[in-house]
Image (cartoon, rainbow, N blue to C red):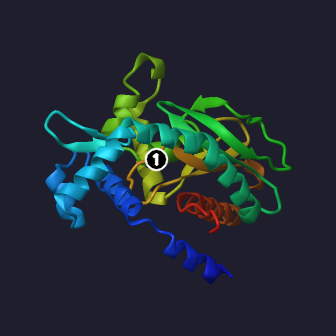
Amino acid sequence: MRDMAGSREGAAIVPSVARAARILELLASAPEGMTLSEVARALGLPPSSALAICTTLRQAGLAHRTPERRYMLGPGILALAERYTRGGLPALFMRACRDALPDARETVVLAVREWHEVVYLAQRPGNRPLAVNYHLGMRLPAHTTASGKAALSTVSDAEVREIYSLPSSSGVDVDLLIEDLRKTRDRGYAIDDEETAPGMVCLGVPITVPGASTTTAAVAVSLVKSTVDDEVLSEYVGVMRALAETLSTDPSPAE
């Protein structure tokens, strides 16, 4: 049955839509933008076809043409991403949690970084009491939380310094934070060792998107520190990595 569904999906592909999606992927990989001839050449399209698609994307707000006639991603992309992050991603998170953590021992959260803070979008509550009661819309400092540090670890050191250069984020030792983020990148996960609350250890993993080098979204699990040993740590690092990978690749079943 799944093979038949896959065949129907393949037969239903609209070539022009597929080309438009490919153009958006190209523009996403070219921060300086691309000329029409570069777009056409990259996809092997006639310039007239590339122009028609780029014009349609511009009208939809998904692409922008600079005065130098270079095409870049448009503001509509950000609006779509925001809607997905606020709506679709939490639903996927809750479904993925049911598969990845059926026993509901520990609390798992989904958060996005907004500049120097994280905003919590969803949680799968566990049955162990915690020092922090997460709730929808709750904000915490990104530099002390596992989800915040996981998201920050995907941006450059220079961007981290820019984020923490504003008065609203004063009081943060940026050099220490950057060192922590470098360790996070090396490990592949972030650690909040009683930084958010006494007696609580959290592990965070960024939710990455294929083709993108940075992200603002992350998942994290909160553990009672007295229950954490090497075996528990290894178990939940693996679970969080699997959960983040599932969300990164969109587990939506074929229709």
Measuring from the top left, give residue 57's x and y in whole percent: 35, 45
Measuring from the top left, give residue 170's x and y in whole percent: 45, 20
User: Is residue 7 positioned above or below 89 on the image?
Assistant: below
Q: Which image quarter holds the C terminus?
A: bottom right
Image quadrant of residue 41? Answer: bottom left
Q: Which residue is mark 1?
A: 215
Image quadrant of residue 42? Answer: bottom left
- Amino acid type, callout 1: Thr
Q: Which image quarter holds the N terminus?
A: bottom right
Measuring from the top left, give residue 250's x and y in whole percent: 57, 60
User: SS for tag 1?
Assistant: loop
Residue drawn at (56%, 40%) of the image: 83
Front-lying residue, 62 or 198 = 62
Residue drawn at (74%, 34%) of the image: 135
Residue drawn at (46%, 27%) of the image: 172
Residue drawn at (36%, 56%) of the image: 20
